[in-house]
Each structure stands twice: as structure tokens, then as C-alpha cells.
Amino acid sequence: MKLKTEMIVLHDRESLQKLALENHSIFWWNGQKAKSWSDLIHLIAKSLEFPEYFGSNQDALYDGLLDLAWIPNSNILIVIEHFEKILCDELITEPDAPSELLLLLQDVVTEWRHYAEVEEANIPKKNITFGFINSPKLKETFLQNNIEFREI
């Protein structure tokens, strides 16, 4: 099964075996280690080796995910596990934080789908897929936010 730029919900870790992952750079984000936006941004920046000039805020996160020129592979799979724990420290003051994250990632997927390489920009096209190991309320959150996803 060839991956394309999209959001997918994986029934479990073993579902990854159904994916054609040759020629993919694979990154793993553990939601248990990202209890706040600060934690999450740090985890992503470290995982994807964002440049030092990368800012530590949501706008910079979005911009970084739309660059990735330093990753040589054009096919990127980012697996997110324990989504139910992600941003849990933010929920008291920002109950929609997980939805905001999904919407940000959906915007990244949409931008990459429609990206046309521009030589002056020096950013090669990436085929980026976000795979979520299924967890409580994950699909419900996708549906509530009208975010397209595929199940595997």
C-alpha cells in the first residue's frame, strides 16, 4: 500500500507492517512526552532536526513542517502514538488543544498536497504522511473537526 500525503489512523502498531515503507524517512512522536505545547514543539524540533533558527511557537512549528528541506528523503512518515495523552497539561485552559494540533497537521497535509516546487524557494516537494496509532477519542476528534483520514 503506497503512502501519499494524508492523515491515517492505524489500528495498532502492527498495522505499520501493511504499509510500503521502503524509501521513507520515519519519525515517531510519543504523545506521553508532549504534555504541553512547549514539550510538543521541542519533541518535534528534535525529532525532525529543525535548524537552530527555528522558533519555539505554533507558527514556527507550522513553518518548519512546510520546509523540511534538510531531510533528504522526499517520502516522510510521522507516526504519532498516545494521542490521548498529547497536550494533556493544556486541557484545563485550552480544551481544544488536541483539535488545534490535528487542524495544524491537516493544514500541513493540505499545503504539501498542493505544493508546486519553486526553484527560488529551494524547498523540494515532500510526500508527508501523519499516521496515528488509534487511541480513545482519536477518530471522534477527527470527525468533530471534519478532518479527512484513512484507516488501516
Image (tube, rainbow, N blue to C red):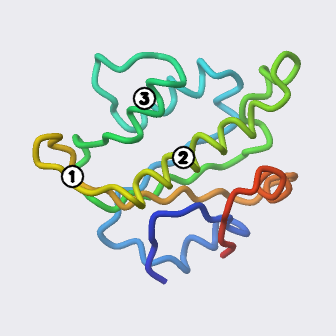
**Farthest residue in the left direction?**
119
Q: Of marks 2 and 3, which one's residue comes earlier in the chain?
A: 3
Report the amino acid beneath label 2.
Asp
Q: Position of residue 36 (x, y in %)?
A: 68, 21
**Front position among marks 2 and 3:** 2
Check residue 52 in the rendering and tell me which mark sits there, or answer none: none
Residue found at x 60% / y 22%: 39
Residue at the disc numbered 3: 45
| Residue contact between numbered discs 1 and 2, judged by CB atoms under 8 Å | no
Q: Nearer the viewer, mark 3 or mark 1?
A: 1
The picture quadrant where one finds residue 67 is top left
Residue that label 1 marks? 124
Question: What amino acid is at disc 3?
Answer: Ala
- Residue 30: x and y in percent read 62, 41
Figure disc tally: 3
Q: What residue is rendered at 81% in x and 58% in y?
A: 143
Mark 3 neighbour density, 10 Å: few (under 14) some (14–19) many (20 or more): many
In the rendered view, would you say 50 is above or below 9? above
Residue 55 screen position, x and y as percent: 41, 16
The residue identified by callout 2 is 107
Tell me, yes or no, whether the two marked residues, 3 and 1, touch with CB atoms within 8 Å: no
Whole-percent x and y of residue 87?
73, 29
SS at mark 2 in the image:
helix
- Left or right of 144: which side holds 103? left
Q: Is residue 22 or residue 126 the one in the foreground?
A: 126
On screen, residue 22 above or below 42: below
79, above or below 40, in the image: below
Q: Identify the residue at horizontal 42%, vertical 56% (top origin).
A: 26
Give the CA separation, mark 1 to mark 2.
18 Å
